Image (cartoon, grey):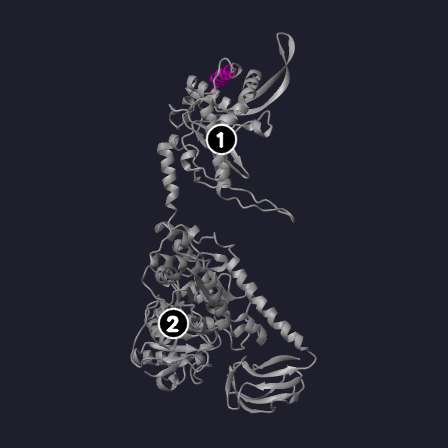
């Protein structure tokens, strides 16, 4: 099995889907000739041409709107937001149109659009290049939000998103793009949207997280294993709608739950995860549900020291796990 | 001189280790703070490691070519200025620190009784007495894992079965059990008492605990009422004093006033069996046997051994029993047999000089009689003052079982018997 980086898995999924289905096309800022600012669409312009790899104006509302329209017309657009931070002008299109289309039209219309966006900090990108925006969309029935943590999951889930008959937001952690590498099968495969995945079996503390934080958790877990602390790690993969069954099972497994997100703490995805656990697992809980998250400040700071303070890292995760394990 | 460590510094944000390409110093070299001591190669940079101290290189721990992680030891430096006493002072300090922490971890039980929902559920499902579980969590908290281990091992400490047995026994045959110290089903909540320097804390154990439990039970369960009569025992005193020396010589034990009182009470109880009874919830059990409990104090302890069939016994027989039971109590030889079966209690409070007291009923009996001090007092007889030996008899009664009328009659009868005890009417044999 070839080893790929996280971003190579994105490219591979796009390429394979475009080869498989000619209705699949890509649109976004600089996705064509340049191959994307992160090079996620590298080579697609050459292979599929300007009609399937569209460079758009700097107008996110239009990127989303055009994509939704094309999707309603039977196409399979993959729209790219250059940074998740830039998605805000497109929110009306995504929430008011894409999310509600099937419901509003009594099942006559649907919008099989995938909107990709790199999110997250740790790259010295400051305010407008570091945000986590998933919580903005995470109470909109009709939308699905996928946030993979490994190259393998990226390929399988991006393909699933493109093939899904309804709108999917596909958030890729930009720090993971070149940091994370892993084995990815060359052949075609899809992973189920809406299913969480156990990334590590353990019996002392349950960690539920998603995205880049899964790796911080895995690193911390490896270190703590030497001390005899055995962490169980559940990767949500899809943060909306949540895989309640897997969350409940993972929480019950140890009774001590640590939830991690890079997003601002209050109102984040993991708050909802905590609610699911407290509704279903009271008599299995052995400790208060703990959250490790970014501070409640408006955005990622630029100063390296401040960015370090904001970001989750393996040390913070390790400390939080140990604290719960010792409780 | 103090020995300090120099560790591999953080040479770049993502640098986790460095390889020592060459040492720039050797053992015995003098270095100033910030002087370079080694060249280190990382995957990002080649850098010189500065000394963190001024002093003499004592030992190079890492060798050239070694790759060591950030934060790991490179070498030791003997620093100047610091005295060796500092060094020695440091090690014991460290060791005390460690013991402190150890003590803290073993002693800190503040979370012992904070049970998580999971722990409580598992305790209920598996009938585990959490009091008997040692917690490994913070502050002695019992963790879910602790419970899982106990359940997996099968060694389940269940609630003390003794509690239940005693409880049952008392319920079915409570009238038989009498003053046997009973483990209460519920501990009485005691508010914390502030202690100050010089205060002495005495742990409540054994007999003291049993006394406390019995007293609480009696006072909380039994509605006490009280009644006192005054008895003229001048004749009795004269009679007893006239024979006591002979008696002691002949029998080998003392003829106490208390024996006469016990005899009188036993006799009166025969006539008023209502007082020789017990509360049994839905019924009152009148006891056939008259077994009189007597209170015997020993240092910090109080026992209530029983004079069995007191109504069958002569004053001498009662005196012997009293003497024997008191001796046994004082030498700690009382058996549970000696303590059982009491139906009424006579308490010799007079021996402490008391002239009036209100006894706590010896649960589950119906009443207790306090025999107070015999005191010479002026009394009016036939409109004339007379110096008489007077004694107060104070009765505490269970108002569920007894009322004033019958108790008044009983006390009047005891009084009558006692006032008529003299050489002519009463034989001690």
Q: Tell whether A266 sits left or right of B83.
A: left
- Expressed as whole percent of the image width and height from the top left, the position of residue B283 reads 38, 25
Q: Tell whether A319 sits left or right of B312.
A: right
Which one is nearer the viewer's eye here, A286 or B223?
Answer: B223
Q: Are marks 2 and 1 on the same chain?
A: no
Q: Secondary structure at mark 1?
A: helix
Task: Please tell me whether residue B53 belongs to the stretch shown in magenta.
Answer: no
Which one is nearer the viewer's eye here, A154 or A166?
Answer: A154
Q: Check contact, mark 2 vs mark 1: CB within 8 A.
A: no
Tell me which chain the residue with mark 2 is part of.
A
- Expressed as whole percent of the image width and height from the top left, the position of residue B416 reads 51, 14
Q: Which residue is mark 2?
A: A114
Q: Which residue is mark 1?
A: B323
- Expressed as whole percent of the image width and height from the top left, the position of residue A46 reads 38, 87
Residue B392 numbered tag = none
- Residue that sits furthest to the top in the current view: B382
Q: Is residue A131 above or below residue B306?
A: below
The magenta span reads B402-417
Q: Main secondary structure of the magenta part?
A: helix
State the image quarter where residue A117 is shown. bottom left
- Depth check, mark 2 against mark 1: the one in front is 1
Which one is nearer the viewer's eye here, B292 or B216?
Answer: B292
Which one is nearer the viewer's eye here, B365 or A114?
Answer: B365
In the rendered image, the quadrant that contains the N terminus of chain A is: bottom left
Q: Residue at x 47, y 41 (%)?
A: B187
Specify few, some or many for label 2: CA neighbours under 10 Å numbering under 14, 14-19, or 20 or more: many
- Expressed as whole percent of the image width and height from the top left, the position of residue B155 reads 35, 55
Residue A268 in view of the camera = no
Marks 2 and 1, Cα distance to the nearest angstrom? 101 Å
Task: Please tell me whether residue B412 belongs to the stretch shown in magenta.
Answer: yes
Specify few, some or many for label 1: CA neighbours under 10 Å numbering under 14, 14-19, or 20 or more: some
């Amino acid at each position: 099995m070839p080893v790929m980086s996280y971003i190579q898995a994105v490219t591979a999924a796009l390429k394979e889907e475009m080869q498989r289905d000619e209705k699949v096309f890509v649109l976004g800022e600089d996705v064509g000739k340049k191959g994307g600012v992160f090079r996620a669409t590298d080579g697609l312009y050459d292979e599929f041409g300007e009609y399937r790899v569209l460079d758009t104006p700097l107008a996110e509302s239009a990127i989303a709107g055009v994509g939704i329209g094309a999707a309603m017309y039977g196409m399979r657009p993959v729209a790219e937001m250059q940074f998740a931070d830039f998605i805000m002008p497109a929110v009306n299109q995504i929430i008011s149109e894409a999310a509600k289309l099937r419901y509003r039209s009594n099942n006559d219309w649907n919008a099989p659009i995938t909107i990709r966006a790199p999110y997250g900090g740790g790259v010295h990108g400051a305010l407008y290049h570091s945000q986590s925006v998933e919580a903005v969309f995470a109470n909109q029935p009709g939308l699905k939000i996928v946030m993979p943590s490994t190259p393998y999951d990226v390929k399988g889930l991006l393909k699933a998103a493109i093939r899904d008959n309804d709108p999917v937001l596909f958030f890729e952690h930009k720090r993971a793009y070149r940091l994370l590498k892993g084995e990815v099968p060359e052949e075609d495969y899809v992973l189920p949207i809406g299913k969480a995945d156990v990334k590590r079996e353990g019996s002392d503390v349950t960690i539920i997280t998603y995205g880049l934080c899964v790796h911080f958790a895995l690193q911390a877990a490896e270190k703590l294993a030497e001390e005899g602390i055995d962490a169980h790690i559940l990767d949500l993969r899809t943060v909306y709608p949540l895989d309640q069954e897997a969350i409940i099972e993972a929480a019950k497994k140890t009774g001590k739950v640590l939830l991690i997100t890079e997003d601002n703490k209050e109102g984040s995805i993991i708050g909802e995860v905590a609610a699911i656990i407290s509704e279903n697992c009271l008599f299995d809980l052995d400790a208060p549900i703990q959250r490790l998250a970014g501070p409640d400040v408006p955005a990622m700071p630029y100063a390296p020291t401040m960015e370090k303070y904001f970001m989750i890292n393996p040390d913070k995760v390790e400390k939080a796990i140990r604290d719960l394990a010792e409780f | 001189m103090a020995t300090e460590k120099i560790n591999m510094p953080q040479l770049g944000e993502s640098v986790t280790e460095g390889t020592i390409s060459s040492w720039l110093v050797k053992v015995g070299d003098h270095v100033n703070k910030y002087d370079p001591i080694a060249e280190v190669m990382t995957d990002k940079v080649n850098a010189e490691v500065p000394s963190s101290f001024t002093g003499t290189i004592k030992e190079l721990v890492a060798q050239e070519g070694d790759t060591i992680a950030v934060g790991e030891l490179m070498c030791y430096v003997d620093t100047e200025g610091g005295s060796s006493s500092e060094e020695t002072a440091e090690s014991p300090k460290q060791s005390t620190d460690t013991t402190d922490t150890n003590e803290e971890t073993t002693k800190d039980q503040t979370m012992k009784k904070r049970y998580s929902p999971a722990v409580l559920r598992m305790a209920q499902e598996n009938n585990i007495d959490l009091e008997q579980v040692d917690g490994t969590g913070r502050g002695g908290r019992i963790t879910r894992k602790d419970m899982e281990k106990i359940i997996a091992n099968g060694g389940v400490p269940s609630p003390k079965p003794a509690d239940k047995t005693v409880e049952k026994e008392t319920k079915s045959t409570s009238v038989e059990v009498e003053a046997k110290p009973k483990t209460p089903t519920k501990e009485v909540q005691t508010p914390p008492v502030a202690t100050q320097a010089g205060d002495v804390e005495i742990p409540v154990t054994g007999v003291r605990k049993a006394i406390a439990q019995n007293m609480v039970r009696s006072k909380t369960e039994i509605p006490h009422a009280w009644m006192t009569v005054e008895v003229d025992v001048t004749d009795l005193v004269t009679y007893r004093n006239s024979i006591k020396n002979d008696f002691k010589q002949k029998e080998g034990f003392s003829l106490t006033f208390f024996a006469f009182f016990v005899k009188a009470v036993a006799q009166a109880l025969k006539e008023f069996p209502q007082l020789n009874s017990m509360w049994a919830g839905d019924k009152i059990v009148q006891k056939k046997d008259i077994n009189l409990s007597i209170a015997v104090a020993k240092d910090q302890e109080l026992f209530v051994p029983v004079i069995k069939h007191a109504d069958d016994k002569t004053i001498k027989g009662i005196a012997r029993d009293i003497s024997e039971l008191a001796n046994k109590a004082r030498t700690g030889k009382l058996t549970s047999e000696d303590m059982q079966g009491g139906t009424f209690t006579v308490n010799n409070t007079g021996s402490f000089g008391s002239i009036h007291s209100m006894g706590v009923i010896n649960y589950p009996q119906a009443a207790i009689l306090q025999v107070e001090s015999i005191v010479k007092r002026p009394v009016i007889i036939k409109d004339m003052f007379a110096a008489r030996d007077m004694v107060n008899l104070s009765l505490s009664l269970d108002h569920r079982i007894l009322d004033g009328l019958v108790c008044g009659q009983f006390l009047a009868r005891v009084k009558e018997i006692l006032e008529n005890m003299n050489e002519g009417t009463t034989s001690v044999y």
